[in-house]
Amino acid sequence: MFYAIPLEHRPSWRNPPWMTVLLIVVNMIVFWGPQRSEENVRDRAATFYVASPLPAIEVPRFVAWLEETGDKHLKEARALQKAGNHRMLLRWMEQEDDFQQRVKAPGFVSQENPQYADWKSARTQYEARLPAPFTRKWAQSYAKDAEPNPVTWLTATFLHGSTGHLIGNMVFLFLFGFSVELALGRGWYLAFYLLGGLGGSLLAGWAYAGTGSYGLGASGAVSALMGMYAVLYRLRRVRFFYQLFFYFNYVTAPALLLLPAWIANELLQHWLSGKGVAYMAHLGGLVTGASLMALTMLLRKKPLEVPVTQDEAEGGDDGFDTHVANAQRLAQGMQFEQALTQWRAAAKLRPQDQPVLSAWFKTASLWPDGEDFHRAARRIFRLQAHDTATLDFQHTSYRTYLDKAKPGARLQPDDMARLSRRFARAQQWDDAEKLFNALHKTAPAHPELGETLGMLVSALCHAGRREQAAAFGPQLEKLAPRSAGLQMLRGR
């Protein structure tokens, strides 16, 4: 048994999830309306049945039929018979379509049997008390000879077998539904919910065909919402409550990791638990929902607006401190390769944190031909702060990167332009000039080329290096004839 429930999100009442609320209301109306009315009439009929001669005649024949067909639950039926629990046996009998056909067939109780008249009279009165079928009519049939009825693939998702069944599904519908609705919009959300229900029904119809039972419940559609949720949030870390058999706890993890966990759980439960719960409907919904969301995000020109997590909104714990503590502990134990992974994860969460970037960069320098060394350097070069300490940190890291990177430094044109301007501000003239020349050579049409040279010339002029700045004059006239640097060279 595995459950995972998101704890991060709260409904936005400025844009209420009305479609989610409407779906919940519809499910409740169906259950406490026609389904409950049918159940009440059936209960009254069952009361008549138990008090009539029917149990004494039909129950032994039902147990004998179970023995004849080799039913694995025969022992339970005998226990119920011994305990005189005829009401439970009646419910069981009514779900066995093959046995019901036998009851209605001539000869179930022969006319020569002394009990025939009592049985026939009581059976007629009992059947007259039964309600018009509603749940079985609109549920998905898994009977052996059942003809495909596409309408029930959808209507079955609005039926439930008990109050607990309904409440469980509605809780999950609300927890996952409102986030997906806010991202998709009400129209697409409703369409995907219904398609997810259909996907669950289709897989369940294939998996349980010929079992003689029937399927109902919103589980397939709700599972589709879970699949959509996982794909929607992908690698964003979301706080979940989970239960694995008898163990439960909280965990913050990338949402997408829950999709294979959910899928594996449904397959395992299907294998272990038999036919009591339609786990294949859950699996069909999960796969359908995940596929629909992935396709939508792939084809949609404008990215979906993903509701923020509670940690993102409130600045709560996102695991950063844990990664830093793990990295420090591993480094102290000389486990630098494992520490590198933790520094990388911490830097991803705080891309502007200089101590973390410095630790990541220094650890990665142990493998100067590794991808982490290049990635850490790029992250340092893209720091946004302009203070002296940041500029010095960037320049020192730049020199280290040039000296150690194998087979060589991999600088992007944007990084060259940014570092050239920053090093000019830090009066690191040689490196600023070399970076500009490299940019001019590798990306002569770069949109920031003129601005970079203009800033370099201005910085040289401010530092009293007019002769060095003048050497760039002809080049600056071509690239940025109206730049402030050129105006300073002309003495204006």
Image (tube, rainbow, N blue to C red):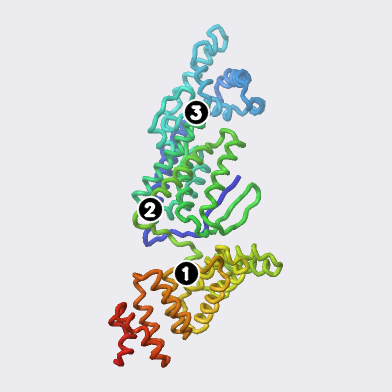
In the image, 215 versus 57, the foreground residue is 215
Please state which amino acid type lies under the numbered disc 3.
Ala
> Is 426 displayed left or right of 17 in the figure?
right
User: Quadrant of residue 308 in the image?
Assistant: bottom left
* Residue at (38% x, 82% y) in the render: 455
* Residue at (65% x, 28% y) in the render: 76
Number of numbered discs present? 3
Sequence-first disc among 1 and 2 = 2
Expressed as whole percent of the image width and height from the top left, the position of residue 310 reads 49, 63
Local crowd size for mark 2, using a 10 Å CA cut-off: few (<14), some (14–19), many (≥20): some
**On residue 411, which mark appears?**
1
* Residue at (54% x, 73% y) in the render: 402
| Residue that mark 3 sits on | 209
| Residue that mark 2 sits on | 184
Of marks 1 and 2, the one in the foreground: 1
Please state which amino acid type lies under the numbered disc 2.
Leu
> Is 291 displayed left or right of 357 in the figure?
left
User: Quadrant of residue 337 in the image?
Assistant: bottom right
Q: CA distance from mark 1 to mark 2?
A: 39 Å
Expressed as whole percent of the image width and height from the top left, the position of residue 271 reads 60, 36
Of marks 1 and 3, the one in the foreground: 1
Secondary element type, mark 1: loop
State the quadrant of the C terminus. bottom left
Q: Is residue 298 above or below residue 383?
A: above
State the quadrant of the N terminus. top right
Using the rendered image of the protein, determine whether residue 56 is visible from the camera's viewpoint: no
Local crowd size for mark 1, using a 10 Å CA cut-off: few (<14), some (14–19), many (≥20): some
Mark 1 and mark 2 residues within 8 Å of each other at the beta carbon: no
In the image, 292 versus 200, the foreground residue is 292
Q: CA distance from mark 3 to mark 2?
A: 34 Å
